[in-house]
């Protein structure tokens, strides 16, 4: 069902909004409306614009929590926002020198890694770098070259007496090396190596020893850096653990204030003649929560509260919050897929839960496979919380029920007697019953449309809609006549049938002017040519009659799939050789899995199609606004 709502107008001094939010509102699920939009016609209304001044303290608190690790125990103690700010600022100041040292170590670590990255490719050079610097007549360059260009370069190196190329390392893409050349020829050699796309890589100038020794020294420094960093980390933790509980309480308080600060997005400000500024909040609560909140705020002199019933004429549409028993909760998924009911519209969750699972069971009647659906769906729903799994589990119960009615267990038709009938032995009866069952559901959908029309006070829809009272009389008369013919009874007088069918169709044809007359709307007749109106109305009535027929015949699929299930399992049993007395159990097991999976999927989709197109379209609009509590908007 749809929860009853109340709209609350909450006002008070602008600077008091955080206290109100923290002390009262944060404990309730409230759907806030944008107060500025709701009050746009009034003067002196401005948005509540402020920078979140709790954000900086919140960030500091989050950084402190990183050093405290997991929560060892929970405390129900609280503190004020001023106390929380002082605790966090004080703790942050205590660890600030340690943080600065950590930042220095982090920068040092990055420098070491960069040096190691430059040195690593040249580890294969077994020569001290500092001695290279002592060369007076020979220059050198470190770098890399692609493997492809390296092979081309080798020919040049072999013929050139003025350069020496020493390979240090390589992979599938590059060769890292150092080349030497006399100082007087280095410019010429640089140009040649550049033509082969040799990329120069400068190595650290202060590197001592061989590249391998330099890399080992850097690795040792990196390890020492890591040890120092961990030591400081431990010192920070020791400092903060002395007041861990206070810090956690303060962080919790600041986090709440920081998140609740966002309430300003929905608030408006108004200025009085004396210069005092007040905030204005508009929020929807369930009726029970609204009454509790009103009692709590009653003695608070800084708060002015006004409430409005959702049934009154309001400028904003009430949001829809569904409240159903646990067994029906999964079926809310189907309702949400189509669209939430408007506030004054009937919640179809119970209707779809009953009709969907009932039709699924009729079309998929098997005790064994139904039991598998019940168990599998229940476990999946409990473990993963998948709502579709919960729907499958409930549908499996009806599958078991109709499996007993049909006498079918995992496709075996002789294990238990049929309480009702075997579908394959009564094909025409199954199809005719399916059509009759569909006609009954369509009539029920029409009755629900009447109820929704009454709730919405749409009296034209109530009386003259194709699914209103006129539609019920017309369709119901035809359905009763069909039933009388099938059962062998005589029909009422032709004139009675004509009046019961013809007059409602005329009313449906003239529904627009009749609706305007009943609802006192003007003009009564639509604009334009009356002839064109009548032509369009006749076409529409023809479409109505056609939809009655097609919607009803569409339910043949309920019986058809019941036959299909029995037929497919019959094929499985034939392939398994059941008639020969020595069945292949592997074929039976695999056949059951295939039929249950394939037909279960198809049946689930077809039943949902019947729900949406043949029934929901007759009584349900689904244009409701979802209820989104403030604490779930983020």
Image (cartoon, rainbow, N blue to C red):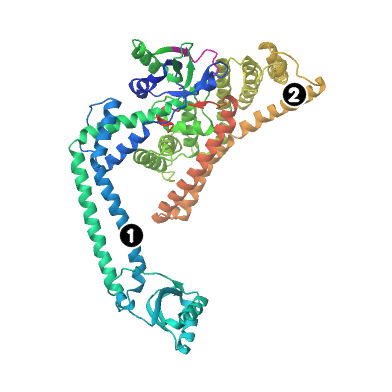
> Judging from the image, what secondary structure is the residue with disc 2 in?
helix
10 Å neighbourhood of mark 1: few (<14), some, or many (≥20)? some
Q: Is residue 512 left or right of residue 32?
A: right
In this view, the residue in front, 317 or 617, is: 317
> Judging from the image, what secondary structure is the residue with disc 1 in?
helix
Q: Earlier in the sequence, mark 2 or mark 1?
A: 1
Q: Which quarter of the figure has residue 525?
A: top right
- Residue at numbered disc 2: 537
10 Å neighbourhood of mark 2: few (<14), some, or many (≥20)? some
Rendering coords of residue 403 (x, y %): 43, 38
- Asked whether the viewer can see residue 535, the reply is yes
Q: Is residue 405 left or right of residue 71?
A: right
Residues at marks 2 and 1, CA–CA distance in whole angstroms: 82 Å
Q: Which quarter of the figure has residue 501?
A: top right
- Residue at numbered disc 1: 111
In this view, the residue in front, 317 or 183, is: 183
Q: Quadrant of the N terminus?
A: top left
**Which residue is found at the position 41% from the left and 34% from the top?**
394
Rendering coords of residue 339 (x, y %): 53, 30
Rendering coords of residue 111 (x, y %): 33, 60
Is residue 66 shown above or below 572? above
Q: Is residue 557 magenta?
A: no
The magenta region covers: 306-315
Rendering coords of residue 437 (x, y %): 55, 29
In this view, the residue in front, 506 or 154, is: 154
- Asked whether the viewer can see residue 582, the reply is no
Is residue 456 shown above or below 102? above
Is residue 562 shown above or below 283? below
**Which residue is found at the position 24% from the left and 56% from the top?**
226
């Amino acid at each position: 069902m749809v929860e009853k709502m109340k709209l609350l107008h909450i006002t008070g001094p602008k600077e008091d909004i955080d206290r109100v939010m923290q002390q009262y509102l944060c404990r309730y699920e409230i759907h806030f409306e944008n107060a500025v939009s709701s009050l746009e016609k009034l003067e002196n209304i401005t948005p509540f614009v402020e920078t979140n001044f709790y954000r900086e303290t919140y960030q500091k608190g989050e950084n402190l929590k990183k050093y405290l690790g997991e929560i060892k125990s929970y405390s129900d103690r609280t503190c004020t926002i001023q106390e929380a700010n002082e605790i966090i600022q004080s703790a942050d100041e205590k660890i600030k020198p340690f943080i600065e040292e950590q930042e220095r170590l982090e920068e040092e670590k990055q420098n070491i890694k960069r040096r190691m990255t430059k040195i690593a490719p040249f580890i294969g050079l077994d020569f001290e770098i500092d001695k290279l610097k002592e060369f007076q007549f020979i220059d050198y360059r470190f770098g890399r070259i692609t493997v492809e260009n390296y092979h081309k370069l080798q020919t040049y190196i072999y013929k050139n007496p003025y350069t020496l190329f020493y390979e240090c390392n390589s992979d599938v893409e590059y060769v890292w090396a150092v080349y030497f050349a006399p100082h007087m020829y280095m410019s010429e050699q640089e140009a040649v190596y550049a033509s082969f796309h040799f990329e120069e890589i400068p190595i650290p100038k202060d590197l001592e020893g061989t590249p391998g020794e330099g890399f080992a020294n850097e690795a040792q420094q990196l390890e020492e850096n890591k040890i120092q960093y961990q030591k400081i980390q431990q010192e920070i933790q020791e400092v903060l653990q002395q007041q861990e509980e206070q810090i956690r309480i303060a962080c919790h308080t600041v986090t709440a204030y920081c998140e609740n600060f966002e309430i300003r997005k929905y608030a408006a400000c108004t200025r009085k003649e004396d210069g005092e500024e007040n905030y204005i909040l508009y929020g929807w609560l369930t009726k029970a929560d609204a009454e509790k909140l009103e009692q709590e705020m009653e003695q608070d002199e800084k708060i002015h509260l006004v409430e409005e019933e959702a049934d009154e004429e309001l400028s904003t549409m009430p949001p829809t919050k569904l409240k159903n028993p646990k067994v029906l909760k999964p079926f809310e998924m189907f309702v949400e897929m189509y669209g939430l009911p408007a506030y004054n519209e009937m919640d179809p969750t119970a209707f779809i839960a009953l009709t969907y699972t009932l039709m699924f069971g009729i079309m998929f009647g098997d005790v064994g496979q139904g039991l598998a659906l019940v168990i599998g769906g229940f476990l999946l729903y409990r473990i993963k919380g998948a709502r579709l799994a919960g729907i499958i589990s409930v549908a499996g119960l009806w599958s078991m029920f109709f499996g007993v009615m049909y006498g079918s267990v995992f496709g075996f038709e002789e294990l238990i007697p049929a309480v009702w009938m075997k579908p394959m032995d009564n094909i025409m009866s199954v199809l005719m019953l399916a059509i009759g069952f569909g006609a009954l559901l369509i009539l029920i959908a029409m009755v629900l449309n009447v109820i929704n029309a009454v709730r919405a006070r749409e009296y034209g829809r109530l009386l003259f809609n194709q699914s209103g009272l006129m539609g019920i009389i017309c369709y119901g008369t035809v359905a009763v006549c069909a039933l009388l013919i099938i059962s062998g009874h005589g029909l009422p007088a032709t004139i009675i049938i004509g009046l019961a069918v013809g007059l409602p169709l005329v009313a449906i044809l003239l529904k627009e002017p009749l609706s305007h007359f009943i609802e006192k709307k003007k003009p009564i007749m639509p604009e334009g040519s009356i002839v064109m109106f009548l032509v369009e109305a006749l076409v529409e009535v023809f479409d109505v009659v056609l939809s009655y027929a097609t919607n009803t015949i569409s339910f043949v699929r309920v019986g058809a799939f019941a036959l299909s299930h029995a037929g497919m399992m019959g094929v499985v049993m034939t392939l398994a050789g059941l008639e020969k007395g020595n069945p292949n159990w592997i074929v039976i097991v695999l056949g059951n899995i295939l039929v249950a999976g394939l037909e279960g999927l198809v049946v689930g989709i077809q039943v949902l199609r019947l729900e949406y197109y043949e029934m929901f379209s007759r009584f349900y609009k689904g244009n409701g606004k979802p209820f989104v509590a403030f604490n779930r908007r983020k």
